[in-house]
Amino acid sequence: MYVEELFENNKEWVKQVLNSDPNFFAKLANQQSPKFLWIGCSDSRVPANQITGLAPGEVFVHRNIANLMVHTDLNALSVLQFAVDILQVEHVIVCGHYGCSGVLAGLTNKRLGLVDVWLRHLKDVAYQHSTYLGSIHQSQKHDRLCEINVVEQVKNTCHTNVVQDAWARGQKLSIHGIIYGIHDGLLRDLNMHINNEEELQTKYNQYIQSLSNSDTETETA
Ligand code: CO
């Protein structure tokens, strides 16, 4: 595909949009007021708007490799701060996906270059859960770490100053952890819907507990 095709596609898209709503762009030009912030993976197969059926203007998006919320990442933190404080989004969605090669890097020692520095965060998550990961079948490790990583990034997001301050001043803000199946196009709920610090502790502990329970099931099966 050549870049020229992108311009052709764009003209076609504008035509279609204007056909169904002649004022679409005029309305959006004034302001954006999305209800959602999406923190997802850069993977080209996981486009936030398309898989959620959201139109331009409906979701503020931050994507990086392996959907990480790192406490020293000024880029992600700026997006979060702008979304929460200025745009007043009500929902932050941390979306991982199965088959994430960034997550896989957390399980292997393959060197890829500069990105290894970024993926060190993933290795830390894998290390933190190494007892559980060591207890399950090799074929399950990648998928489970994709899920665990979402839960850990939900926790990191909740622990940012931005979210803590929003909750402290009584702002309505929920952080959600979900995961997408590249193989079937479906989003799955990881049952991490967090509205305050207390809920974070409860749901996070429940999740960690469920991991050790599933260990036992595997062992006795
Ligand atoms: Co990915």
Image: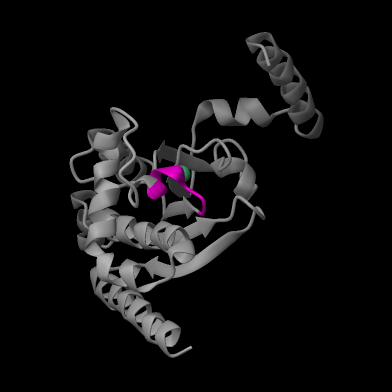
Where is residue 210? Give x, y as percent.
Answer: 37, 80
Instruction: Report the span colored magenta.
Output: 98-104
Instruction: Please name the residue shown 28% across and 61% down the image.
Output: 155
85 and 41: which is toward the camera: 41
Instruction: Please name the residue shown 57% across and 30% down the image.
Output: 28
Q: Residue furthest right?
A: 19
Q: Residue furthest bottom?
A: 220
Instruction: Please name the residue shown 29% across and 58% down the image.
Output: 126
Q: Would residue 132 appear left or right of 25 to someone viewing this image?
A: left
129 and 209: which is toward the camera: 129
79 lies above or below 163:
above
144 and 175: which is toward the camera: 144
* Magenta stretch: includes residue 87: no
The answer, for residue 99, to whether it is visible in the render is yes
94 lies above or below 62:
below
Where is residue 119? Give x, y as percent.
Answer: 30, 41
Q: Residue furthest top?
A: 4
Name the quarter where the N terminus is drawn: top right
Q: Which of the colour schemes (rainbow, by chain, secondary structure, one colour) is used?
A: one colour
197 lies above or below 5:
below
Instruction: Please name the residue shown 41% across and 67% down the image.
Output: 193
The answer, for residue 78, to whether it is visible in the render is no
* Magenta stretch: includes residue 102: yes
Where is residue 167? Give x, y as percent.
Answer: 25, 61
Q: How many marks?
A: 0
Where is residue 7? Give x, y as percent.
Answer: 68, 13
Q: Would residue 148 appear left or right of 95 to someone viewing this image?
A: left
Q: Would residue 51 appear left or right of 168 to someone viewing this image?
A: right
